[in-house]
Amino acid sequence: MVDRNGWGRDRPAPTGAPHSPPASFVEQANVSDADVYAAFEDDWPDCWERAAALLSWDEAYDTVLEDDDAPFYRWFPGGKLNASYNCVDRHLESGRKTHAAIRWEGKQGERETYTYRDLYVAVNEFAAALRDLGVEADDVVTIYLPMIPELPIAMLACARIGAPHSVVFAGLSADALATRMNSADSEYLITCDGYYRRGDAFNQKSKADNACLALEHDVRTVVVDRLGDELPHVLGDDEWEYHALREAFAGETVAPVSRDAEDMLFLMYTSGTTGDPKGVVHTTGGYLAHVAWTSHAVLDVKPEDTYWCAADIGWITGHSYIVYGPLSLGTTTVMYEGTPDYPDRDRLWEIVDRNAVDIFYTAPTAIRAFMKWGPEYPERYDLSSLRLLGTVGEPISPRPWNWYREHIGGGECPIVDTWWQTETGAVTISTLPGVDDMKPGAAGPGLPGIDVQVVDETGKEVDPGEAGYLTIARPWPGMARTLYDGDERYRTEYWTRFSDPDADEWRYFSGDTACIDEDGYVTVLGRVDDVIDVSGRRLSTMEIESAITDVDGVVEAAVVGRSDGRTGTDIYAYVSTDGNRDATDGVRTAIVDNVETTIGPIATPTEIVFTPELPKTRSGKIMRRLLADIANDEELGDTSALRNPEIVGEIQTESGDR
Ligand code: WTA
């Protein structure tokens, strides 16, 4: 059963029955010609000019790719452009001034619409204000804001004057903010007084103040007054109020600074497996070309669409697919401040219905929650405006995939399961919805021009169906250029393990494990660290989890290893079920049966602990490390990044009662 690398088994990828996109979708799709794969292949890397052609350039680039200093690739060198011009000004010039750019839905039911003209005014005035505060090209501006319109406005204002932004997710702690600001030597901060959390006013400014106390340098701060009298605040010496600045610079315009394609557009911190967070550097030309192209080809975004990516701009998904991708194409992007279950579990569907949303993009963790709550919530609304659905962030197993298609997509909408990372900048693996069949449980093939390969320890490609390391064998435009804290760390983290510098052969290592089927479809199995060694066999936790979540009634599962104190490892499974079942309903037996039939008895969990929820990070990823600590009776690591810290105690009690 075990393949020669001891890696998973010899078996077809665990995908559900394939679906073809409906003819009505294909007919109108931005990309529907299957030759696109061959066209990219035959003309690589110049094929990426089609992505660059979606942008407006101030000066043409000299060449598409410069690779003489690999792995430090340069895309579209010599080209000049401005991201804020591409996302705002050019849509005014093409006669779309009154077209909605951002439709904002606030937590308390507030609504605001920014036309492209409104966005232009706001971005210009704020850019003028930032300049006046001293911000110059290449100064890193940190933005610590919740999902309010001032967040994309601030990002675009920075982009306009050539100042890279570093957005820190608003839910992160003062410590996390301070670490990131220190690491980037960031002397400017844009934050707010506070925001609503489940109806209560929550003080953000005091977190920002605490962070500033811990900094090694002085900071100038802009504060957005989100809560008014609800949360009065006093401005200190180096602090300015956003709306007052806008008034002071009312009507001012700032010429967009022409940036080199390889100049930094932004920094995005992501957690490393060890050490400090990594400041991933994205540049202007390649990043913008890649997000525009994938918004066009994968998300099928058209200017007349109302498009909604229900993520937070504090993470890469929101940067690429709430702000830069959709706005560069001149579409209407919906921005939602709240959570899916407040004030009720039908909130998202009410927004889809009222705005006639065409495209909806979210994470598997949200889809599993919708499935748990039941179909009655989406059934209350007319979701027939939806044409395409997307998912990102984690593997999605066939059951929630099918549920999503059935209950949100009316049994019709194609689904794109998009694999990518903070470091890849934009989508790198996905079906093209106007071209490819979909297989529930598999993301899809590498996009045209993206050379995805699954390899063994020695860097050799594995056979179809075998598990291995997910790598990309050629550079791509949206790729991170380096880490802010050093080229050496960038090289070591991503380019050392499977590259052969002497032969000038470079292979990006994603840190994920995966398998590829005969058709080239990739099923992501998890992170390299999500592997457990049972009696000398390496099993992917995601694979066991997929076998568990395929059981009727199971909503989510997380699997971790528990050391048995001698030499082996036991498999512990933490499982949450939908509202109607509990462990006595035979779910436990069904889980064991399904794991045994789909993987084998070697993967049968020693313990199955039922819990109402799994511990999640704020970006919605299951925190397996914490569950491993619980399973191993170890002192719990840092829980500050958890969205639902209260669940930890419940799981400990539940585990203790076994
Ligand atoms: C995981 C989010 C399976 C993967 C855009 C990756 C996925 C990490 C998928 C990056 C997917 C993302 N299927 N796993 N469709 N999309 N991942 O940097 O482990 O927050 O390495 O970027 O999420 O997370 P990040």
Image (spheres, grey):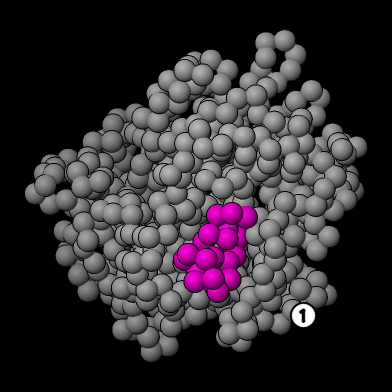
Q: Is residue 5 visible?
A: yes
Kind of residue at badge 1? Asp
Identify which residue, 511 or 243, lies in the foreground: 511
Determine the residue positioned at 73% across, 47% down.
Answer: 514
Image-based side of 441 in relation to 263, left or right = right
For the record, the magenta segment spans: 398-421
Quadrant in which the N terminus is drawn: top right
Residue 293 vertical placement versus 650 (above, below): below
Q: Which residue is mark 1?
A: 35
Looking at the rendered structure, the secondary structure element under dot 1 is: loop
Determine the residue positioned at 35% across, 45% down.
Answer: 170
Q: Is residue 158 visible?
A: no
Look at the image and say whether residue 405 sits in the magenta stretch: yes
Quadrant of the rendered image containing residue 434 = bottom right
Quadrant of the rendered image containing residue 629 = top right
- Image location of residue 69, percent across then percent down: 75, 53
What count of labels does the image hold?
A: 1
Look at the image and say whether residue 416 sits in the magenta stretch: yes
Residue 432 vertical placement versus 9 (above, below): below
